Amino acid sequence: MSVPLRVLHLEDSPGDAGLVRRALAKADFAVQVERVEDAAQFRAALARQPWDVVIADYRLPQFDAPGALGVLHETGLDLPFIVVSGVIGEESAVQLMKAGANDYVLKDNLARLGPSVTREVAEARRREQARHAREELQRSQALLATLVESTTDAVYVKDLAGRYLWFNPAAAALTGKAAAEVIGRDDTALWPAAEAQVIMADDRRIMAGDRPQLIEEEVTTPAGRRTLFTTKGPLRGADGSPIGVFGIARDITPRRLAEDELRASHAQLRALAARLCTIREEQGAHIAREIHDVLGQQLTALKFDLVWLRRRCADVGDAQLAGDLAEKIATALQLADASIQTVQKIATELRPGTLDKLGLVAALQQVAREFGERTRIRCELAPMPETLALDSERSTGVFRICQETLTNVARHARATRVQIRLACDPAGLTLEVRDNGVGIASEHLTGRSSLGLLGMHERAMLLGGRLEISGAAGQGTTVKLQLPIPPGS
Protein backbone atom coordinates (compact mmCIF):
# COMPACT_ATOMS: atom_id res chain seq x y z
CA MET A 1 0.00 0.00 0.00
CA SER A 2 1.41 3.39 -1.03
CA VAL A 3 2.43 5.86 1.63
CA PRO A 4 1.14 9.45 1.17
CA LEU A 5 4.02 11.91 0.71
CA ARG A 6 3.76 15.71 0.35
CA VAL A 7 6.82 16.99 -1.54
CA LEU A 8 7.91 20.58 -2.08
CA HIS A 9 10.26 20.32 -5.07
CA LEU A 10 12.66 23.16 -5.91
CA GLU A 11 13.44 22.41 -9.57
CA ASP A 12 13.45 24.42 -12.82
CA SER A 13 13.41 21.41 -15.15
CA PRO A 14 10.01 19.73 -15.68
CA GLY A 15 11.79 16.65 -17.05
CA ASP A 16 13.98 16.22 -14.00
CA ALA A 17 10.91 16.80 -11.80
CA GLY A 18 9.18 13.91 -13.57
CA LEU A 19 12.17 11.63 -12.97
CA VAL A 20 12.05 12.44 -9.24
CA ARG A 21 8.32 11.76 -9.13
CA ARG A 22 8.76 8.38 -10.81
CA ALA A 23 11.58 7.42 -8.47
CA LEU A 24 9.41 8.17 -5.47
CA ALA A 25 6.47 6.26 -6.95
CA LYS A 26 8.75 3.21 -7.41
CA ALA A 27 9.51 3.49 -3.67
CA ASP A 28 5.75 3.03 -2.95
CA PHE A 29 4.98 6.69 -2.24
CA ALA A 30 1.68 8.28 -3.26
CA VAL A 31 3.23 11.61 -4.16
CA GLN A 32 1.59 15.02 -3.91
CA VAL A 33 4.18 17.39 -5.31
CA GLU A 34 4.44 21.12 -5.92
CA ARG A 35 7.33 22.44 -8.05
CA VAL A 36 8.72 25.92 -7.39
CA GLU A 37 11.64 27.74 -9.04
CA ASP A 38 12.51 30.83 -6.96
CA ALA A 39 12.66 32.14 -3.40
CA ALA A 40 9.26 33.87 -3.47
CA GLN A 41 7.46 30.73 -4.66
CA PHE A 42 9.42 28.65 -2.13
CA ARG A 43 8.42 30.92 0.78
CA ALA A 44 4.78 31.03 -0.33
CA ALA A 45 4.58 27.24 -0.59
CA LEU A 46 6.10 26.75 2.86
CA ALA A 47 3.51 29.10 4.34
CA ARG A 48 0.56 27.69 2.44
CA GLN A 49 0.45 24.08 3.68
CA PRO A 50 2.42 21.44 5.64
CA TRP A 51 5.01 19.33 3.80
CA ASP A 52 6.73 16.04 4.50
CA VAL A 53 10.01 16.71 2.66
CA VAL A 54 11.83 19.36 0.63
CA ILE A 55 13.76 18.14 -2.43
CA ALA A 56 15.95 20.78 -4.04
CA ASP A 57 18.21 21.04 -7.09
CA TYR A 58 21.56 22.47 -6.08
CA ARG A 59 21.53 25.39 -8.50
CA LEU A 60 18.65 27.13 -10.34
CA PRO A 61 18.69 30.25 -12.51
CA GLN A 62 17.11 32.42 -9.75
CA PHE A 63 17.76 30.41 -6.60
CA ASP A 64 19.95 27.65 -5.13
CA ALA A 65 19.88 24.94 -2.45
CA PRO A 66 21.93 26.84 0.19
CA GLY A 67 19.54 29.79 -0.10
CA ALA A 68 16.50 27.50 0.20
CA LEU A 69 18.02 25.83 3.24
CA GLY A 70 18.47 29.26 4.83
CA VAL A 71 14.83 30.15 4.13
CA LEU A 72 13.69 26.86 5.64
CA HIS A 73 15.69 27.55 8.81
CA GLU A 74 14.16 31.03 9.03
CA THR A 75 10.66 29.52 9.16
CA GLY A 76 11.58 27.24 12.07
CA LEU A 77 10.08 24.23 10.29
CA ASP A 78 11.74 20.88 10.90
CA LEU A 79 11.52 19.35 7.41
CA PRO A 80 13.92 16.89 5.79
CA PHE A 81 15.97 18.74 3.14
CA ILE A 82 17.42 16.52 0.43
CA VAL A 83 19.50 17.86 -2.43
CA VAL A 84 19.08 16.14 -5.82
CA SER A 85 21.54 17.48 -8.37
CA GLY A 86 23.33 16.47 -11.53
CA VAL A 87 26.75 17.72 -10.48
CA ILE A 88 27.81 18.71 -6.98
CA GLY A 89 31.30 18.90 -5.67
CA GLU A 90 32.34 17.07 -2.54
CA GLU A 91 33.19 20.33 -0.78
CA SER A 92 29.80 21.82 -1.63
CA ALA A 93 28.06 18.67 -0.40
CA VAL A 94 29.96 18.80 2.89
CA GLN A 95 29.08 22.46 3.37
CA LEU A 96 25.40 21.71 2.73
CA MET A 97 25.38 18.88 5.24
CA LYS A 98 27.02 21.12 7.82
CA ALA A 99 24.40 23.79 7.12
CA GLY A 100 21.62 21.34 7.91
CA ALA A 101 20.81 19.38 4.77
CA ASN A 102 19.87 15.81 5.51
CA ASP A 103 21.21 14.10 2.37
CA TYR A 104 22.21 14.60 -1.22
CA VAL A 105 21.47 12.31 -4.15
CA LEU A 106 22.93 12.52 -7.65
CA LYS A 107 20.41 12.58 -10.49
CA ASP A 108 22.10 9.67 -12.14
CA ASN A 109 21.53 7.56 -9.01
CA LEU A 110 17.86 8.24 -8.15
CA ALA A 111 17.49 4.68 -6.80
CA ARG A 112 18.91 6.11 -3.56
CA LEU A 113 16.18 8.75 -3.34
CA GLY A 114 13.34 6.49 -2.07
CA PRO A 115 15.30 4.97 0.86
CA SER A 116 16.73 8.39 1.74
CA VAL A 117 13.28 10.00 1.81
CA THR A 118 11.87 7.09 3.83
CA ARG A 119 14.67 7.36 6.37
CA GLU A 120 14.62 11.14 6.73
CA VAL A 121 10.81 11.46 6.87
CA ALA A 122 10.68 8.80 9.58
CA GLU A 123 13.44 10.56 11.50
CA ALA A 124 11.64 13.91 11.19
CA ARG A 125 8.45 12.36 12.52
CA ARG A 126 10.36 10.91 15.48
CA ARG A 127 11.77 14.37 16.16
CA GLU A 128 8.27 15.83 15.94
CA GLN A 129 6.92 13.25 18.37
CA ALA A 130 9.81 13.88 20.75
CA ARG A 131 9.18 17.62 20.51
CA HIS A 132 5.49 17.15 21.28
CA ALA A 133 6.43 14.88 24.20
CA ARG A 134 8.84 17.51 25.55
CA GLU A 135 6.23 20.23 25.20
CA GLU A 136 3.63 18.07 26.95
CA LEU A 137 6.12 17.27 29.70
CA GLN A 138 6.91 20.97 30.09
CA ARG A 139 3.18 21.78 30.33
CA SER A 140 2.67 19.02 32.89
CA GLN A 141 5.66 20.16 34.89
CA ALA A 142 4.43 23.74 34.81
CA LEU A 143 0.97 22.62 35.94
CA LEU A 144 2.46 20.47 38.71
CA ALA A 145 4.68 23.32 39.82
CA THR A 146 1.70 25.69 39.91
CA LEU A 147 -0.33 23.23 41.97
CA VAL A 148 2.52 22.50 44.38
CA GLU A 149 3.42 26.16 44.77
CA SER A 150 -0.22 27.14 45.34
CA THR A 151 -1.38 24.40 47.72
CA THR A 152 -1.71 25.10 51.43
CA ASP A 153 -0.15 21.70 52.22
CA ALA A 154 3.60 21.50 52.73
CA VAL A 155 5.14 19.59 49.80
CA TYR A 156 8.77 18.53 49.60
CA VAL A 157 11.15 16.08 47.94
CA LYS A 158 14.33 14.63 49.46
CA ASP A 159 17.18 12.60 47.99
CA LEU A 160 18.51 9.31 49.35
CA ALA A 161 20.62 11.13 51.92
CA GLY A 162 17.60 13.04 53.22
CA ARG A 163 18.63 16.36 51.64
CA TYR A 164 15.80 18.58 50.44
CA LEU A 165 15.48 18.99 46.67
CA TRP A 166 12.08 20.73 46.57
CA PHE A 167 10.45 22.85 49.26
CA ASN A 168 7.21 24.69 48.42
CA PRO A 169 6.00 27.99 49.95
CA ALA A 170 3.58 26.22 52.33
CA ALA A 171 6.50 24.20 53.73
CA ALA A 172 8.47 27.42 54.14
CA ALA A 173 5.55 29.06 55.97
CA LEU A 174 5.18 26.06 58.29
CA THR A 175 8.85 25.82 59.21
CA GLY A 176 9.73 29.51 59.11
CA LYS A 177 12.59 28.69 56.72
CA ALA A 178 12.91 29.95 53.15
CA ALA A 179 13.48 27.32 50.46
CA ALA A 180 16.97 28.70 49.80
CA GLU A 181 17.89 27.96 53.44
CA VAL A 182 16.68 24.37 53.21
CA ILE A 183 17.55 23.06 49.73
CA GLY A 184 20.58 20.79 49.95
CA ARG A 185 20.27 20.31 53.72
CA ASP A 186 18.58 17.60 55.77
CA ASP A 187 16.00 17.74 58.59
CA THR A 188 18.53 18.80 61.20
CA ALA A 189 18.30 22.25 59.59
CA LEU A 190 14.57 22.40 60.38
CA TRP A 191 13.79 20.54 63.59
CA PRO A 192 15.34 19.81 66.99
CA ALA A 193 17.82 16.92 66.83
CA ALA A 194 15.51 14.29 68.39
CA GLU A 195 12.61 15.18 66.08
CA ALA A 196 14.89 15.24 63.04
CA GLN A 197 16.19 11.75 63.82
CA VAL A 198 12.64 10.36 64.07
CA ILE A 199 11.61 11.98 60.77
CA MET A 200 14.72 10.76 58.92
CA ALA A 201 14.22 7.23 60.30
CA ASP A 202 10.66 7.30 58.93
CA ASP A 203 12.02 8.48 55.57
CA ARG A 204 14.47 5.56 55.38
CA ARG A 205 11.71 3.12 56.24
CA ILE A 206 9.44 4.60 53.57
CA MET A 207 12.18 4.47 50.91
CA ALA A 208 12.80 0.81 51.73
CA GLY A 209 9.11 0.05 51.12
CA ASP A 210 7.07 -0.01 47.96
CA ARG A 211 4.06 2.19 48.68
CA PRO A 212 3.10 5.55 50.22
CA GLN A 213 2.13 5.65 53.89
CA LEU A 214 0.21 8.01 56.16
CA ILE A 215 2.20 9.23 59.16
CA GLU A 216 1.31 11.50 62.06
CA GLU A 217 4.27 13.66 63.03
CA GLU A 218 4.83 15.94 66.02
CA VAL A 219 7.19 18.83 65.26
CA THR A 220 8.34 22.05 66.89
CA THR A 221 7.88 25.14 64.70
CA PRO A 222 8.24 28.88 65.35
CA ALA A 223 4.49 28.81 66.12
CA GLY A 224 4.94 26.07 68.72
CA ARG A 225 4.20 22.34 68.73
CA ARG A 226 2.28 21.24 65.65
CA THR A 227 0.73 17.96 64.58
CA LEU A 228 1.22 17.05 60.90
CA PHE A 229 -0.74 14.46 58.95
CA THR A 230 1.78 13.47 56.28
CA THR A 231 1.64 11.29 53.18
CA LYS A 232 5.11 9.96 52.39
CA GLY A 233 6.12 7.75 49.51
CA PRO A 234 9.28 6.42 47.84
CA LEU A 235 10.64 7.93 44.61
CA ARG A 236 12.22 5.45 42.20
CA GLY A 237 14.47 5.76 39.19
CA ALA A 238 14.00 4.18 35.77
CA ASP A 239 15.58 0.95 37.03
CA GLY A 240 13.22 0.78 40.01
CA SER A 241 15.83 1.58 42.63
CA PRO A 242 14.96 4.22 45.28
CA ILE A 243 16.24 7.72 44.60
CA GLY A 244 14.44 9.66 47.32
CA VAL A 245 11.20 10.33 49.14
CA PHE A 246 8.34 12.79 48.73
CA GLY A 247 6.11 14.21 51.45
CA ILE A 248 2.78 16.07 51.56
CA ALA A 249 2.10 17.36 55.07
CA ARG A 250 -1.05 19.01 56.41
CA ASP A 251 -1.12 20.85 59.72
CA ILE A 252 -3.99 19.27 61.68
CA THR A 253 -3.18 20.94 64.98
CA PRO A 254 -6.48 22.91 65.16
CA ARG A 255 -8.45 19.77 64.35
CA ARG A 256 -6.50 17.74 66.89
CA LEU A 257 -7.12 20.37 69.58
CA ALA A 258 -10.83 20.36 68.71
CA GLU A 259 -10.87 16.54 68.89
CA ASP A 260 -9.14 16.63 72.28
CA GLU A 261 -11.64 19.17 73.55
CA LEU A 262 -14.50 17.07 72.21
CA ARG A 263 -13.13 13.93 73.87
CA ALA A 264 -12.71 15.82 77.13
CA SER A 265 -16.27 17.12 76.83
CA HIS A 266 -17.57 13.60 76.17
CA ALA A 267 -15.61 12.31 79.16
CA GLN A 268 -17.10 15.06 81.35
CA LEU A 269 -20.60 14.28 80.09
CA ARG A 270 -20.11 10.58 80.80
CA ALA A 271 -18.78 11.36 84.24
CA LEU A 272 -21.81 13.56 84.82
CA ALA A 273 -24.13 10.84 83.52
CA ALA A 274 -22.45 8.30 85.81
CA ARG A 275 -22.82 10.64 88.75
CA LEU A 276 -26.48 11.27 87.92
CA CYS A 277 -27.10 7.51 87.72
CA THR A 278 -25.43 7.05 91.10
CA ILE A 279 -27.39 9.90 92.65
CA ARG A 280 -30.63 8.58 91.18
CA GLU A 281 -30.00 5.10 92.56
CA GLU A 282 -28.99 6.50 95.96
CA GLN A 283 -32.06 8.74 96.11
CA GLY A 284 -34.23 5.85 94.94
CA ALA A 285 -32.82 3.61 97.66
CA HIS A 286 -33.31 6.33 100.28
CA ILE A 287 -36.89 7.06 99.19
CA ALA A 288 -37.65 3.33 98.99
CA ARG A 289 -36.44 2.85 102.57
CA GLU A 290 -38.46 5.83 103.77
CA ILE A 291 -41.58 4.59 102.02
CA HIS A 292 -41.09 1.04 103.19
CA ASP A 293 -40.05 1.84 106.76
CA VAL A 294 -42.18 4.88 107.54
CA LEU A 295 -45.20 4.75 105.28
CA GLY A 296 -45.35 0.97 105.39
CA GLN A 297 -45.21 0.95 109.20
CA GLN A 298 -47.86 3.64 109.44
CA LEU A 299 -50.18 1.75 107.11
CA THR A 300 -49.61 -1.45 109.07
CA ALA A 301 -50.42 0.35 112.34
CA LEU A 302 -53.53 1.78 110.73
CA LYS A 303 -54.57 -1.73 109.71
CA PHE A 304 -54.11 -2.99 113.27
CA ASP A 305 -56.28 -0.16 114.55
CA LEU A 306 -58.97 -0.98 112.02
CA VAL A 307 -58.90 -4.60 113.08
CA TRP A 308 -59.28 -3.49 116.73
CA LEU A 309 -62.24 -1.31 115.78
CA ARG A 310 -63.88 -4.16 113.90
CA ARG A 311 -63.67 -6.32 117.02
CA ARG A 312 -65.25 -3.59 119.17
CA CYS A 313 -68.19 -3.12 116.82
CA ALA A 314 -70.05 -5.88 118.67
CA ASP A 315 -70.00 -3.74 121.82
CA VAL A 316 -72.05 -1.03 120.13
CA GLY A 317 -75.63 -1.20 121.44
CA ASP A 318 -77.25 -0.09 118.19
CA ALA A 319 -77.23 -3.05 115.81
CA GLN A 320 -77.77 -0.84 112.76
CA LEU A 321 -74.82 1.38 113.71
CA ALA A 322 -72.69 -1.66 114.44
CA GLY A 323 -73.40 -3.07 110.96
CA ASP A 324 -72.61 0.23 109.26
CA LEU A 325 -69.36 0.56 111.20
CA ALA A 326 -68.36 -3.01 110.37
CA GLU A 327 -68.96 -2.34 106.67
CA LYS A 328 -66.95 0.88 106.69
CA ILE A 329 -64.12 -0.78 108.62
CA ALA A 330 -64.04 -3.66 106.12
CA THR A 331 -63.73 -1.15 103.22
CA ALA A 332 -60.99 0.72 105.08
CA LEU A 333 -59.11 -2.53 105.65
CA GLN A 334 -59.25 -3.28 101.90
CA LEU A 335 -57.88 0.21 101.14
CA ALA A 336 -55.14 -0.27 103.74
CA ASP A 337 -54.15 -3.63 102.19
CA ALA A 338 -54.13 -2.07 98.69
CA SER A 339 -52.07 0.87 99.97
CA ILE A 340 -49.55 -1.46 101.58
CA GLN A 341 -49.18 -3.38 98.30
CA THR A 342 -48.80 -0.10 96.37
CA VAL A 343 -46.16 1.10 98.81
CA GLN A 344 -44.28 -2.17 98.44
CA LYS A 345 -44.52 -1.95 94.63
CA ILE A 346 -43.27 1.65 94.56
CA ALA A 347 -40.42 0.84 96.93
CA THR A 348 -39.41 -2.15 94.83
CA GLU A 349 -39.43 -0.12 91.60
CA LEU A 350 -37.37 2.63 93.22
CA ARG A 351 -34.83 0.15 94.53
CA PRO A 352 -35.50 -3.59 94.63
CA GLY A 353 -34.56 -4.81 98.07
CA THR A 354 -33.77 -8.24 96.63
CA LEU A 355 -30.87 -6.73 94.67
CA ASP A 356 -29.23 -5.40 97.82
CA LYS A 357 -30.05 -8.36 100.07
CA LEU A 358 -29.81 -11.43 97.79
CA GLY A 359 -27.84 -10.20 94.77
CA LEU A 360 -28.26 -9.88 91.01
CA VAL A 361 -29.42 -13.42 90.21
CA ALA A 362 -32.27 -13.32 92.72
CA ALA A 363 -33.29 -9.83 91.56
CA LEU A 364 -33.43 -10.97 87.92
CA GLN A 365 -35.51 -13.99 88.89
CA GLN A 366 -37.91 -11.73 90.79
CA VAL A 367 -38.26 -9.17 87.98
CA ALA A 368 -38.84 -11.97 85.45
CA ARG A 369 -41.54 -13.54 87.61
CA GLU A 370 -43.30 -10.22 88.21
CA PHE A 371 -43.04 -9.34 84.50
CA GLY A 372 -44.75 -12.61 83.54
CA GLU A 373 -47.51 -12.14 86.13
CA ARG A 374 -48.13 -8.54 85.08
CA THR A 375 -48.03 -8.93 81.28
CA ARG A 376 -49.08 -12.56 80.78
CA ILE A 377 -45.99 -12.94 78.55
CA ARG A 378 -44.13 -16.17 79.23
CA CYS A 379 -40.74 -15.28 80.66
CA GLU A 380 -38.14 -18.06 80.57
CA LEU A 381 -34.88 -17.92 82.50
CA ALA A 382 -31.93 -20.01 81.41
CA PRO A 383 -29.92 -21.61 84.23
CA MET A 384 -27.94 -18.87 85.95
CA PRO A 385 -24.72 -18.91 87.99
CA GLU A 386 -25.37 -20.05 91.53
CA THR A 387 -22.98 -17.48 92.93
CA LEU A 388 -22.15 -14.17 91.31
CA ALA A 389 -20.29 -11.60 93.35
CA LEU A 390 -20.55 -8.22 91.64
CA ASP A 391 -20.10 -4.78 93.12
CA SER A 392 -23.21 -2.66 93.64
CA GLU A 393 -22.56 -0.44 90.60
CA ARG A 394 -22.32 -3.33 88.13
CA SER A 395 -25.21 -5.27 89.69
CA THR A 396 -27.42 -2.20 89.47
CA GLY A 397 -26.39 -1.48 85.87
CA VAL A 398 -27.10 -5.02 84.67
CA PHE A 399 -30.41 -5.11 86.53
CA ARG A 400 -31.57 -1.75 85.14
CA ILE A 401 -30.69 -2.74 81.55
CA CYS A 402 -32.68 -5.96 81.94
CA GLN A 403 -35.57 -4.05 83.54
CA GLU A 404 -35.62 -1.44 80.73
CA THR A 405 -35.48 -4.20 78.10
CA LEU A 406 -38.50 -5.98 79.61
CA THR A 407 -40.37 -2.66 79.75
CA ASN A 408 -39.70 -2.16 76.01
CA VAL A 409 -40.89 -5.71 75.28
CA ALA A 410 -44.14 -5.06 77.13
CA ARG A 411 -44.69 -1.73 75.34
CA HIS A 412 -43.61 -2.43 71.77
CA ALA A 413 -42.74 -6.04 70.95
CA ARG A 414 -46.19 -7.70 70.91
CA ALA A 415 -44.32 -10.85 72.01
CA THR A 416 -45.64 -14.04 73.59
CA ARG A 417 -42.31 -15.28 74.96
CA VAL A 418 -39.16 -13.74 76.42
CA GLN A 419 -35.93 -15.59 77.19
CA ILE A 420 -33.36 -14.27 79.65
CA ARG A 421 -29.83 -15.68 79.83
CA LEU A 422 -27.09 -14.63 82.26
CA ALA A 423 -23.68 -16.24 81.87
CA CYS A 424 -20.15 -15.72 83.16
CA ASP A 425 -16.81 -16.78 81.71
CA PRO A 426 -13.21 -15.55 81.96
CA ALA A 427 -13.99 -12.85 79.38
CA GLY A 428 -16.74 -11.37 81.54
CA LEU A 429 -20.48 -11.35 82.07
CA THR A 430 -23.11 -11.67 79.32
CA LEU A 431 -26.78 -10.78 79.68
CA GLU A 432 -29.02 -11.66 76.74
CA VAL A 433 -32.74 -10.90 76.50
CA ARG A 434 -34.49 -12.31 73.42
CA ASP A 435 -38.17 -12.00 72.47
CA ASN A 436 -40.30 -13.45 69.66
CA GLY A 437 -42.11 -10.20 68.85
CA VAL A 438 -42.38 -8.04 65.76
CA GLY A 439 -38.69 -7.12 65.75
CA ILE A 440 -37.15 -3.68 66.11
CA ALA A 441 -36.76 -1.58 62.96
CA SER A 442 -33.36 -0.10 62.19
CA GLU A 443 -34.73 3.46 62.25
CA HIS A 444 -35.86 2.91 65.85
CA LEU A 445 -32.35 2.06 67.04
CA THR A 446 -31.39 5.74 66.93
CA GLY A 447 -33.28 9.00 66.97
CA ARG A 448 -35.27 11.18 69.26
CA SER A 449 -37.78 8.45 70.06
CA SER A 450 -35.09 6.01 71.27
CA LEU A 451 -33.82 7.80 74.37
CA GLY A 452 -34.44 4.67 76.45
CA LEU A 453 -32.11 2.68 74.20
CA LEU A 454 -29.58 5.50 74.37
CA GLY A 455 -29.72 5.36 78.16
CA MET A 456 -29.09 1.61 78.05
CA HIS A 457 -26.06 2.11 75.79
CA GLU A 458 -24.77 4.83 78.09
CA ARG A 459 -25.12 2.59 81.16
CA ALA A 460 -23.17 -0.14 79.37
CA MET A 461 -20.39 2.28 78.36
CA LEU A 462 -20.11 3.68 81.87
CA LEU A 463 -19.46 0.15 83.11
CA GLY A 464 -16.86 -0.45 80.40
CA GLY A 465 -19.16 -2.83 78.52
CA ARG A 466 -20.89 -3.01 75.16
CA LEU A 467 -24.58 -3.27 74.31
CA GLU A 468 -25.78 -4.78 71.03
CA ILE A 469 -29.40 -4.56 69.87
CA SER A 470 -30.48 -6.48 66.79
CA GLY A 471 -33.75 -7.55 65.27
CA ALA A 472 -35.59 -8.37 62.08
CA ALA A 473 -39.21 -7.94 61.06
CA GLY A 474 -41.26 -10.84 62.42
CA GLN A 475 -38.23 -12.48 64.05
CA GLY A 476 -38.07 -10.68 67.36
CA THR A 477 -35.38 -8.58 69.02
CA THR A 478 -32.23 -9.51 70.92
CA VAL A 479 -30.51 -7.28 73.46
CA LYS A 480 -27.04 -8.45 74.41
CA LEU A 481 -24.88 -6.87 77.12
CA GLN A 482 -21.21 -7.86 77.40
CA LEU A 483 -19.50 -6.60 80.53
CA PRO A 484 -15.92 -7.17 81.67
CA ILE A 485 -15.57 -8.24 85.28
CA PRO A 486 -12.61 -6.86 87.26
CA PRO A 487 -10.19 -9.48 88.65
CA GLY A 488 -11.28 -10.78 92.03
CA SER A 489 -15.00 -10.23 91.36
Image (cartoon, rainbow, N blue to C red):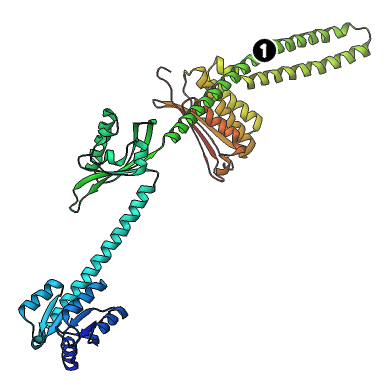
Q: Amino acid at mark 1?
A: Glu
Q: Is residue 284 left or right of residue 40?
A: right
User: Residue shown at 39%/25% (left/top)?
Assistant: 426
Q: Considering the numbered disc 1 on the image, is that residue within a helix, a strand or a loop?
A: helix
Task: Tell me which residue sits at (27%, 32%) in the image.
Answer: 196
Specify the farthest residue to the left: 90
At x 6%, y 77%, the residue is 91
Where residue 327 appears, as percent x and y from the top left, is 86, 17
Name of the residue lying farthest toward the front? 62
Question: What residue is disc 1 on?
Answer: 290
Residue 154 against residue 347 in the figure, above or below: below
* Outermost residue to the bottom: 15
The front one of 216 and 354 is 216
- Quadrant in which residue 477 is drawn: top right
Q: Is residue 447 above or below residue 324?
A: below
- Please state which of residues 382 and 16 is positioned toward the viewer in this rendering: 16
Residue 396: percent from left, percent from top: 54, 21
